[in-house]
Structures are given as C-alpha cells and as structure tokens.
Image (tube, rainbow, N blue to C red):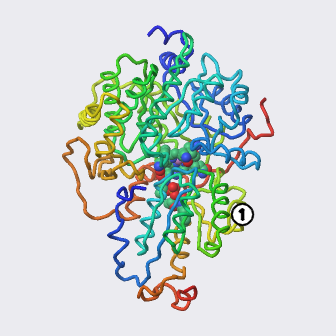
Amino acid sequence: MNLDAIDGGAELADAPVPGVLAPALDIVVTSVSSDSHTWNLVYLQLVLEEMGHRVTNLGACVPDETIVESCRTGRPDLVVISTVNGHGRHDGLRVIRTLRDCPEFAALPVVIGGKLDTVGGAGGQSAAELRAAGFDGVFQDAGAITEFRSFVAALPVAGLTTGWEPRALVGAGEAMAGA
Amino acid sequence: MEGDLVGRSFGDVVRRRAATHGLVVQPRMGFADPARMRAGLVATRGARAATAGTITLDSYTRVGDHESVRLALRRGDDLNGFPIVGHGPDATAAMIDGVAGPDFPIQVRHGSPDPRHIVAALLASGLDATEGGPVSYCLPYSRTPLRDAVDNWARTCEALAGARTPEREPHLETFGGCMMGQLCPPALLVALSVLEGLFFWQHGVRDISFSYAQQTNAAQDEEAVAALHRLAGELLPQARSHVVVYTYMGVFPRTEQGALRLLGDSARLAVRTGARRLIVKTTAEAFRIPTVAENVTALEYAARVAADEFRAEAPLVGETGLHEQAKSIVDAVLELSDDVGAALVAAFARGCLDVPYCLHPDNAGRTRGYVDGSGRLRWKRIGGLPIRETAEVISGRPMSAAELIDALSYVELKYDAGALTPARRPALIEKTTVKERVS
Ligand code: B12
C-alpha cells in the first residue's frame, strides 16, 4: 500500500524516540480480506511508530496469503489485525487458523482489535472465540488502546543482538525472557 | 421532463416525490436475512416521510468473496449487509415482491470495484438503481488497480444502459462526493462526483444522481452543493439528474442528541441547497449496524426537520472560490483524454487527482486536508492538484496519532459537546427479529 499517504513513516520509525529505551519491534499492521476501512490502520501505525517501532502497513482488503507472505518475508515480532466492518469474528478466525497452521508462526504474537461484530459486542462471545482460536490479544473498540499499548510494551523482543538496551518500560528480565 | 411526471424509474420517482413532498429520505440499510431485509424495506416504506428503499450489500459480496457468504450463512454468522449474489435473483425478487412500487423505488448500495456480478444480480431481480463509480468504489474500498476498476465500471454502466426499456430507466448515483468519509476538502469531492457522472454518461447511463457528503462546516457545504449543481448543469445538461446529500460520513457523534443534531443539519443542508434526496445516518452509527427501528427514527426525524426548512433563495454569501477549484480540477482531468476513464487513470498517475489519507497504491498520497479554526475543511498540502490555494499551510512535521484523532473527531466532539446525556452505547433492542418473519 501507499505509505506516502501517512505522515510519520520512516523518519519516525528509524530514529530512536528520545527517552524511551525500547528496542524497536518489527510490526505488521493489517486489515482483513473483506474490510476496506483504513483510518484505523493509519491511526495504529502512528501509535506504534510513536512508541518507537517499525511498522509495515498492508492496507485495505488484505488477502490471507498476503498476510502470510508478509510474515514469511518480514519476520515481524508482532502482527496487529484491525477490522471494524463487523466481519472481524469470521475473518479473524480464518486468518488466525491459517497462521497457526504454519509451524513457523505457531508462537508469533498476533492480536486483533476494532469493532469485531455487527452488534457492538453484545453477547460477548466473539472475543472468547477469537482468543480460543489462537489470538494473543483481542481488543474491542476505542477504550482498548491503553490496554494495547501495555501489551505491546510488555512484548519480549526476539532480536536482542541489535545492540539495543532492554526497554526501560518493563523489567529487563521480562523483556529478555523470550530472547 | 415528461418522464418525471409519469415514470416509475428511480430517478423519476425521486424527482416527482421531491416536487410534491419535499425531500426524499433514504436509509443505509442492509441485513443478511431476507425476511429481516424485507421487514426493513416495509418499515422504510411505512415511515412518516417520503422515502426510497435501500438494500445495502455486505462486505464479502463487495469484494467478490461469495464463498465466505455461503459459509457465514450456513454457520449463522451475521453479515453487515444483504448478499444479493449469494441469495440469488429469485430470493431477491421474492424479498422485494409487493414492497417495491410506483411510489417506493429501491436502490442497491454496495462499494465494489468490480460490481459486474452485483449488477447482473440486481437487474435479474427486477431492480435497476444503484450507486458507485470507478474511483469512489475503488480507492476507499479496495486494493484493486484503478485501471481495472475503470474497465469493470465501464462494463457495469453498459449493462445498466442495456437494461433500458421505455418503462425502465436505470439509475446510477456517483459516490465521488464522499471519498474516505472525512478530511477530503469539498472542491475535490465535487470534482470527483462530476467526473464520475461524466463517466457514467459516456458509458450510456442517462439518469444520474450526483452526491455530496456533509462535511465540517454548513456554509462551506452549501457552497459545495451549489458548485455541484452548477458544474453538473454545465457539463451534463442532457442528463436526467438530481443531487443527493449524505449525512456526515466520518466519525459520528456518540450521544443520541449529538447524532440527531448532525442528522438534522444534513437535512437542512439538503433542503437549502435544492438537493432532492438525503441518505441518513442513525444514532447507532458510532457503534454498530443500526436496527430497523433506529433507521425509521432517523428517516422520520430528517423528514420533520426538512419540512421546516426552506430553499435558500438569495445567492450564497461568503463564496470562497470552491466552484473555481472544482472546475479547474475537472477541466485539467478532461484535458488528459477524451475518454473519461482513461483521463481518470492518467490524472491519478500524475497526482492531478490525489485523495488525502488514501492508502490505495494508485493514489499519489501527497495531499492533506485539515479543519481550520472556523471549522472549514481546507488544504494543508495540495500535492499536484491543479488548483491555487492561497492558504496553503506547509508543515514539515509529521502528524501525530493524537492530532489525527483530533482531526477525525472534530465533528463528533462539536455535536456531542452540548448533549445533556453522556455518550453511551445504545442498547441493542431489535423488535423485527427473524422470528417475526414477514414472508
Ligand atoms: C469512515 C467510515 C467509512 C469509510 C471508510 C473509508 C476508509 N477507507 O477508511 C467508508 C464510507 C468508505 C466506509 C465504508 C463502509 N463501512 Co464504515 N464507517 C466509517 C465510520 C463513519 C468512521 C470510521 C473511522 O474512520 N474511524 C476512525 C478510526 C481512527 O477509528 P476506528 O476505525 O473506529 O477504530 C478505533 C477503535 O475501533 C480502535 N481499533 C480499531 N482497530 C483496532 C485494532 C487494535 C489492535 C486495537 C487495540 C484497537 C483498534 O482504535 C481506533 C481508535 O479508537 C464508522 C462509524 C463511526 N465510528 O462513526 C463506520 C463503520 C465502521 N462502517 C461500517 C460499515 C458496515 C461499513 C461498510 C461495510 C458499509 C456498510 N455495510 O454499511 C463499508 C466497508 C466496506 C468493506 N469492504 O468493508 C460500520 C461497522 C458496523 C459494525 N462493525 O457493526 C460502522 C460502525 C458504521 C455503522 N454503524 O454501520 N466506512
């Protein structure tokens, strides 16, 4: 997708953000195949870049194969799926099963968030079902951003060989546990 | 026009109903279940307002993933609209049987860069009114190359035109007046709406509505709709046409009062500017797919507000050059080729058309819109657009996440601000459930 459409981009992602001793994660931000909303993707990209991470934004209506392919080539530390069109439960279940079926992505952190059904979360089964199918985090709608930031901040970073100090935001032991 | 008085086609009925009853109001309504969809159409027809019916299609049908429609229907998963291809023409014809009529036209609304299968299905179901466009249903709705969408839409227009009979005049509405729902300065919306109308005409469609979506400032919106009327009249005087206004298409107020006030302002805008039709939004917009009852409330509220408003007679004051901007964009695009489709592709390739914040690979992405201190939507960066912008604000600093949310929330906050009751998710009370089947 066209990254020029978003301010921020490389300038922000490549430079360490002053004051945050966090190693940058490589993060894929993506929609699902049926969803064309993109303001959510632009917003999440900016949030993550401001946290000092590198983001690849796959854009709207992303076919499952494109998500898998981008995980193979980019080897991200985290995949963030955002969808608001109401098909999130259906599309999300299909994507996570596809990813978890690939042995190399069995432990890859993958989260989903947005408006995941057509009834504003009434009933509340969608989140439980998505978690059970293999998502590491399910974030419903607007209030979820704070929770999401803490989730990302607590993620172990795989590539500690980059010379970065372990992040100051979480305990060093925790940060290195997954290394 | 003679057809207007007797015709049964969508455009004729809208113009006739608007002439006798004032503004025609229409929902954005779509349900997966045919019985519920029918109940929604029946309720729309029965609302205390001059209404047109809507069948909004689900996202799987829009992207051509009919396999997921089948799976979802089998598993009982809800869809965000009516899968017209999956249900097929017989089921759709049965669903609208006895509901569609000479005073109640129905339009199919979708959002597909390749609507050939959708248009085949709607024509086979006995329907002939829909909406979209090669740009407006490609850039904000897909990753399909613009060139392909242009071809698909040319074939689609030809299919609609081919269904014309003395009694049946297919109707197509541009969606160009909405691009991305928010933060696109009005001159570009007007230009795209007109350009898509010209594209429809070139491919044989004769009854066209030109859309414009309410933005951030009422005076600016009035100037924009006036520019749309003027340009459409100058460039397509031969077409049977009308203007349709959409209630705000961006991040919506979360309070009931805020949502209704915004809806009311869009109804006033439509009446003041001489639009014939208004497509409404509901108090559930910020949260989830609205119920039938919420749609009816919105239709009746908009019609009530419209009935108390009058068409502005005096020429609009405070012209800011919007018509000139829109006209110079349209002229520059049309200079690129006699074929409107080819001109659109060339224009995007060179950034002569460029939609702010649109991630589509064929969009240059060098323009930006912002809301100025008076609430007007302005250009922050014009990229390669063929316009002169006196107040260009060039900011080298990238936008932060918080600034983006502020810009996106301008309307929401303005309308929620005065609300007496706090923002709260409306309870989901759906009376027309599947159990009360109408069929
Ligand atoms: C703008 C808009 C559009 C534009 C989108 C342009 C574009 N390319 O982006 C247009 C007009 C094209 C559009 C089209 C459609 N839309 Co729309 N759209 C909206 C609208 C008005 C605003 C969305 C927006 O821009 N928000 C701003 C961004 C920044 O926020 P956000 O998306 O809400 O996400 C926030 C949170 O959800 C959260 N979040 C999101 N993802 C994630 C992920 C993680 C990990 C985390 C932590 C958090 C998170 O963070 C964000 C900031 O708080 C909303 C209603 C509203 N909110 O007012 C409807 C809405 C999202 N649309 C909706 C629908 C259904 C559609 C359509 C399918 C048409 C239809 N059937 O009505 C089509 C999409 C076609 C498709 N193939 O999917 C529904 C979804 C209903 C549901 N889920 O129950 C909504 C809610 C409207 C409604 N009430 O019916 N839409």
Q: Residue at x 47, y 76 (%)?
A: A25
Q: Quadrant of the C terminus of chain A?
A: bottom right
Q: Furthest-bottom residue in view?
A: A173
A83 with respect to B417 (left or right): right
Q: Which residue is mark 1?
A: A129
Q: Chain of mark 1?
A: A
Q: Residue at x 56, y 72 (%)?
A: A147
B31 with respect to B414 (left or right): right
Number of marks in picture:
1
Q: Is residue B125 something that shows in the picture?
A: yes
**Amino acid type assigned to the residue bearing label 1 in the image:** Glu
The residue closer to the viewer here, B426 or A176, is: A176
The residue closer to the viewer here, B88 or B95, is: B88
* Image position, residue A91 (x, y; %): 63, 55
Q: Residue at x 72, y 27 (%)?
A: B90
B125 with respect to B417 (left or right): right
B339 with respect to B279 (left or right): left
Q: Image height check: is B97 above or below B254? A: above
Q: Quadrant of the N terminus of chain A?
A: bottom left
* Image position, residue B116 (x, y; %): 55, 33
Query: Can you tell which quarter of the image residue A82 is in?
Result: bottom right
The residue closer to the viewer here, B415 or A165, is: A165
Q: Image height check: is B55 above or below A175? A: above
Q: Is residue B419 something that shows in the picture?
A: no
